[in-house]
C-alpha cells in the first residue's frame, strides 16, 4: 500500500491490488482512456480560445485591466473577475492562465448557469459508478481534469450553496471527493471565478456564502463595459472585420465614415459579444465592400428609454448645473452597480477611493 500511495503521489493514475483480475484491468484501462479523451477535449477548447480571442483595446480603461493581468498572472492568488455580460470575462481568465506558470497545464471552464442544478456537483467534482440513477461508470469532474492547471468558474453567482461549500473546501484544503465516494482526492489547481452579479448583495440575502466570497475576492478585476471605453470601438471593429473575413472566407469589408460614427455613438449594451454578432450579421446581409450607414442603422437597437431618461440634462440651460447633475446621476448608477462599495466603484471608474469619497461629499450623494 505504501508503494502504491507513493506512486499515486508521483503521478500514477491508479493502482491495482494483487491478485489481479481481468475485469479490474479493463475497468482501469477504460478510466485512463476516458481521462485522455477529456484532456484532449479541453486542449482543443484551449486552442479554440487561443485562435479566436485576443486582448484588443487601446483605451486607458482597457490598459488598466491589461496591466493588472500582467501583475496577478505570476501568482496563484484567487481572482474574481467582474463585469457585465459580454465584456470578455473568459478572455481575461484565459489571459491570466496563459501568462502564468500553469500555462502548459489545462484551462478548464465550468459554467454554473449552463448546467441543471442537480448535475452541478457531478459535473464539477465527478462521480463514481452507481452514485445516482444513470451513473453507469466513474466520471472525472472538471475540477480533476484541471489538475495542475486553471479552473475557471464562470457565473459563480449561479452556483448552488452545496457546491459552494465543497468549493470552499477545495480552496482551503486542496481536497475534494467525487459524488458517491468517501475517498479524499488531493488537487493542485488555480481557481479563477467570474460573475456579472452583485455578490455582496447575494451574501446579505444568504444566497452566496460570505466565506467563499472573501476567499475568491482576493484580487478583484473589474472589466468596464464597452460604453465606458469608446476609444476601443474602432479598434475592435477593424479587428473583427478582418476576423470574420477569414472565418467566412470572403473579402474584407470596411465601414463608411458615417457608419463608423454611428457605431461609435451606440452604447452596445451587449458589449463585445453584441459587437461581434453585429459584424458577422452585416457581413452576411451587406453586399457592399464599404458598409454604408443606412445598412448599419436598422441593425442596431438604440436604447430609446435610456435616452429619454437622460433627456432632462438637455433642458438645463446652465452648463455648470448640467455637469453637476450628470456627475450625480453617473456616480449613483455606478455605486448602485457595486452595492455602494466605494472601493470597487472607484476602481471601476478609474478614481482614487479618497477622490470618489470627496466627490460624493461635494455633490451630496448619500445611499438612499
Image (cartoon, rainbow, N blue to C red):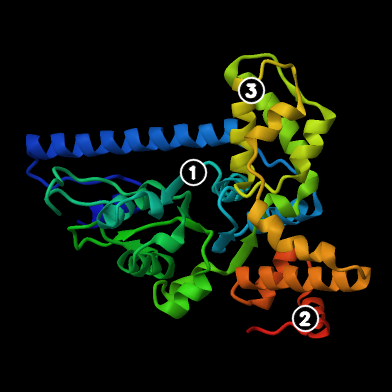
Q: Quadrant of residue 169?
A: bottom left
The disc, 1 or 2, on the residue closer to the chain's N-terminal end is 1
Residue 360, disc: 2
Q: CA distance from mark 3 to mark 2?
A: 46 Å
Residue positioned 68% across, 68% down in the render: 334
Q: Does any portion of residue 10 appear in the rendered image?
A: no
Percent x, y of residue 199: 50, 70
Residue positioned 72% across, 52% down in the render: 227
Badge 1 density bin: few <14, some 14–19, many ≥20, Cα 10 Å: some
Task: Label 2, secondary structure: give it.
Answer: helix
Q: Quadrant of the C terminus?
A: bottom right
Q: Does any portion of residue 282 appear in the rendered image?
A: yes
Percent x, y of residue 311: 76, 61
Q: Is residue 343 left or right of residue 76?
A: right
- Most foreground residue, 113 or 296: 296
Residue positioned 18% across, 51% down in the render: 128
Residue positioned 63% across, 76% down in the render: 341
The disc, 1 or 3, on the residue closer to the chain's N-terminal end is 1
Q: Which residue is mark 3?
A: 283
Q: Which residue is mark 1?
A: 105
Q: Is residue 90 left or right of residue 290?
A: left
Amino acid at each position: 500500500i505504501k508503494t502504491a500511495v507513493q506512486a499515486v503521489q508521483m503521478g500514477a493514475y491508479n493502482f491495482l491490488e494483487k491478485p489481479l483480475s481481468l475485469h479490474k484491468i479493463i475497468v482501469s484501462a477504460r478510466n485512463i482512456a476516458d481521462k485522455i479523451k477529456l484532456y484532449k477535449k479541453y486542449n482543443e477548447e484551449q486552442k479554440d480560445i487561443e485562435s479566436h480571442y485576443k486582448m484588443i483595446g487601446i483605451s486607458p480603461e482597457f490598459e488598466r485591466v491589461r496591466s493588472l493581468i500582467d501583475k496577478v498572472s505570476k501568482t496563484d492568488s484567487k481572482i474574481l473577475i467582474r463585469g457585465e455580460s459580454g465584456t470578455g470575462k473568459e478572455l481575461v481568465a484565459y489571459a491570466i492562465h496563459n501568462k502564468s506558470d500553469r500555462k502548459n497545464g489545462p484551462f478548464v471552464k465550468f459554467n454554473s448557469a449552463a448546467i441543471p442544478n442537480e448535475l452541478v456537483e457531478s459535473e464539477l467534482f465527478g462521480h463514481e459508478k452507481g452514485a445516482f440513477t444513470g451513473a453507469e461508470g466513474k466520471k472525472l469532474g472538471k475540477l480533476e481534469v484541471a489538475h495542475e492547471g486553471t479552473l475557471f468558474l464562470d457565473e459563480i453567482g449561479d452556483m448552488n450553496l452545496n457546491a459552494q461549500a465543497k468549493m470552499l473546501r477545495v480552496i482551503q484544503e486542496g481536497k475534494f471527493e467525487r459524488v458517491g465516494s468517501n475517498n479524499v482526492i488531493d488537487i493542485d489547481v488555480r481557481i479563477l471565478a467570474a460573475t456579472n452579479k452583485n455578490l455582496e448583495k447575494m451574501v446579505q440575502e444568504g444566497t452566496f456564502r460570505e466565506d467563499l466570497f472573501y476567499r475568491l475576492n482576493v484580487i478583484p478585476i473589474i472589466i468596464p463595459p464597452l460604453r465606458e471605453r469608446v476609444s476601443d470601438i474602432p479598434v475592435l471593429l477593424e479587428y473583427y472585420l478582418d476576423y470574420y473575413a477569414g472565418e467566412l472566407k470572403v473579402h474584407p469589408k470596411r465601414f463608411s465614415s458615417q457608419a463608423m460614427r454611428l457605431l461609435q455613438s451606440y452604447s452596445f449594451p451587449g458589449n463585445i459579444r453584441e459587437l461581434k454578432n453585429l459584424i458577422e450579421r452585416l457581413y452576411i446581409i451587406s453586399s457592399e465592400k464599404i458598409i454604408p450607414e443606412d445598412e448599419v442603422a436598422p441593425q442596431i437597437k438604440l436604447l430609446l428609454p435610456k435616452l429619454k431618461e437622460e433627456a432632462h440634462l438637455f433642458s438645463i440651460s446652465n452648463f455648470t448645473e448640467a455637469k453637476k447633475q450628470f456627475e450625480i446621476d453617473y456616480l449613483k448608477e455606478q455605486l448602485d452597480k457595486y452595492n455602494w462599495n466605494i472601493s470597487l466603484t472607484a476602481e471601476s471608474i478609474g478614481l482614487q477611493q479618497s477622490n470618489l469619497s470627496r466627490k460624493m461629499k461635494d455633490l451630496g450623494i448619500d445611499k438612499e
